[in-house]
């Protein structure tokens, strides 16, 4: 049973909660636990803010913004603007990015201290279910929270040390003019857009048959075509087999037998949990086959006093999810309200170019759950492109359970997709029906209004295996 709010739990422990990891999930858990009256300490071995703030979502989005200007300058002439001489400075961008990240890091540490959390710098590791080791001394806590996140995975190939990952990409002294991005997930797609937008000759090499495995099939195909139109060379069915230094460049041998000379090879081949050398198994914490921490619905591990949240677990690897999980742990342990984070219908985005916004089930996943679905889909040339001359198109799609008429999936590829899907996500989360969407008046002229004006449907059944079982109605 959770203790009463506002009480110091047990005086024979140094702290009520000790958090290992100063990323989004750990910081939220620490701050909220302290607000309930718990005595809390948190340790971070690198920089407070974690992957998202320091070398993930935030700096990546800043680079995405920077990479958009090439297209913006091109589009401007269609609207009567004459853009003069222009140039780009990678060092200036990185310096501005570093300044903002330092500000955010200081804000995170400041918020923790203001909340009354003891903020520690350095690595902490588990000794037993109630003890951690930090700075050469042992500290006891009634509860321990592991929130150490994840790190990029680099395949074991010859010359792997010549490649970079997203960690190094934010700190390169100069921008590569030719680059291969290895992988087909959201990080790979996003960085391919960044490098291409900033002027690099960019190849995206992915071993699978199509990029963005796990996303809706139409979204995957549509984005593939769009990023190729922008100049990214997408090479599916191939990955880098070996790297070697050659005449000041990196020679990358692909599995299809081709060899390319580039300035950099970036591995975006997945992420693995930071569970090594933490003392987890010695303390009795069970790990999954991939090294992630096994937890229940309340983020409790196989050891009752040890919890885990965020990318170190086997759940959704998204910053807002880690924050929700951290808050739920605090409410469970110290708020008198056992809480499980809800992982259903979580909206997400890929900041590709054009970007993706999605919530709920893909068409393929919906067919696994429902015997019949209705699919509403459109793609069109956005209004801005009518004057800019851009060939970019927008895709919008709704997936509906035919029996209940609930909208169970919404997907978009196009400008402002993430901003639009955030609002649509509320409707999907609330279980609204297609009739509810239809009854909503659209805002004109916007792309977003298409989500409430879609009328042409195709009925798809499990038996049809993705083919329409009836003509469009």
Image (cartoon, helix red, strand yellow):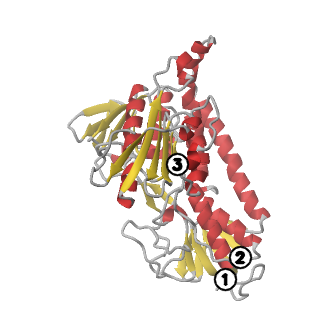
Q: Which mark is residue 34?
A: none
- As measured in the structure, the alpha-carbon distance from the residue carrying label 3 to the one carrying label 2 is 38 Å
Describe residue 110's horizontal placement relative to residue 124 as left or right.
right
Describe residue 61's horizontal placement relative to residue 271 as left or right.
right
CB atoms of marks 1 and 2 within 8 Å: yes
Kindly identify the residue that appears in the image at 52 percent across and 57 percent down.
345
Closer to viewer: mark 1 or mark 3: 3
Q: Is residue 74 visible?
A: no
Closer to viewer: mark 3 or mark 2: 3
**The C terminus appears in which quarter of the rendering?**
top left
N-terminal label among 1 and 3:
1
Q: Is residue 32 above or below residue 240?
A: below
Kindly identify the residue that appears in the image at 63 percent across and 11 percent down.
80
Q: Which residue is mark 2?
A: 335
Q: Quadrant of residue 223?
A: top left
Q: Mark 3 Cα within 10 Å, few/some/many (few <14, many 20+)?
A: many
Query: Could you tell me which secondary element the residue under label 3 belongs to?
Result: helix
Q: Which mark is residue 434?
A: 3
Foreground: 28 or 377?
377
Q: Residue furthest left?
A: 257
Q: Is residue 461 above or below residue 248?
A: below
Q: Is residue 335 visible?
A: yes
Q: Quadrant of residue 17?
A: bottom right
Q: Which mark is residue 2?
A: 1
Describe residue 263's horizontal placement relative to residue 108 as left or right.
left
Foreground: 461 or 144?
461
């Amino acid at each position: 049973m959770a203790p009463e709010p506002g009480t110091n739990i047990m005086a024979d422990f140094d702290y009520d909660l000790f958090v290992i990891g100063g990323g989004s999930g750990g910081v939220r858990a620490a701050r909220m636990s302290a607000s309930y009256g718990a005595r809390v300490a948190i340790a971070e071995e690198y920089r407070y803010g974690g992957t998202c703030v320091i070398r993930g979502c935030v700096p990546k989005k800043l680079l995405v913004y920077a990479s958009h200007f090439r297209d913006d300058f091109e589009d401007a002439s269609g609207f009567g603007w004459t853009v003069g001489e222009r140039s780009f400075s990678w060092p200036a961008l990185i310096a501005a990015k570093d300044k903002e990240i330092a500000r955010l890091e200081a804000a995170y540490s400041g918020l923790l201290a203001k909340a009354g959390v003891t903020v520690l710098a350095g690595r902490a590791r588990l000794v037993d279910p109630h003890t951690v080791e930090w700075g050469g001394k042992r500290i006891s806590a009634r509860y321990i929270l592991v929130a150490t996140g994840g790190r990029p995975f680099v395949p074991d190939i010859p010359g792997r040390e010549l490649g970079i990952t997203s960690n190094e990409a934010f700190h390169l002294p100069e921008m590569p003019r030719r680059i291969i991005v290895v992988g087909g997930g959201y990080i790979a797609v996003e960085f391919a857009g960044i490098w291409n937008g900033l002027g690099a000759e960019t190849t995206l090499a992915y071993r699978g048959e199509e990029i963005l495995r796990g996303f809706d099939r139409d979204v995957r195909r549509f984005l593939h075509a769009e990023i190729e139109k922008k100049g990214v060379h997408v090479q599916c069915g191939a990955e880098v087999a070996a790297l070697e230094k050659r005449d000041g460049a990196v020679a990358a041998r692909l599995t299809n037998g081709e060899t390319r000379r580039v300035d950099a090879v970036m591995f975006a081949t997945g992420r693995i949990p930071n569970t090594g050398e933490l003392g987890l198994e010695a303390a009795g914490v069970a790990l999954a086959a991939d090294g992630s921490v096994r937890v229940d619905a309340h983020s409790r591990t196989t050891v009752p006093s040890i919890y885990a949240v965020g990318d170190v677990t086997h759940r959704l690897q998204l910053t807002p999810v880690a924050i929700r999980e951290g808050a739920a742990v605090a409410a469970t342990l110290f708020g008198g309200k056992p809480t499980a984070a809800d992982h259903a219908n979580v909206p997400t985005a890929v900041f590709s170019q054009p970007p993706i916004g999605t919530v709920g089930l893909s068409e393929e996943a919906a067919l696994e759950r429902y015997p019949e679905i209705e699919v509403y889909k459109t793609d069109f040339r956005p209004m801005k492109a009518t004057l800019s001359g851009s060939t970019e198109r927008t895709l919008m799609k709704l997936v509906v359970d035919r029996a209940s008429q609930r909208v169970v999936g919404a997907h978009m590829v196009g400008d402002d997709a993430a901003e639009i899907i955030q609002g649509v996500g509320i409707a999907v989360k609330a279980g609204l029906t297609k009739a509810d969407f239809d009854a909503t008046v659209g805002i004109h002229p916007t792309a977003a209004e298409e989500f409430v004006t879609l009328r042409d449907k195709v009925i798809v059944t499990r038996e049809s295996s993705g083919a329409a079982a009836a003509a469009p109605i």
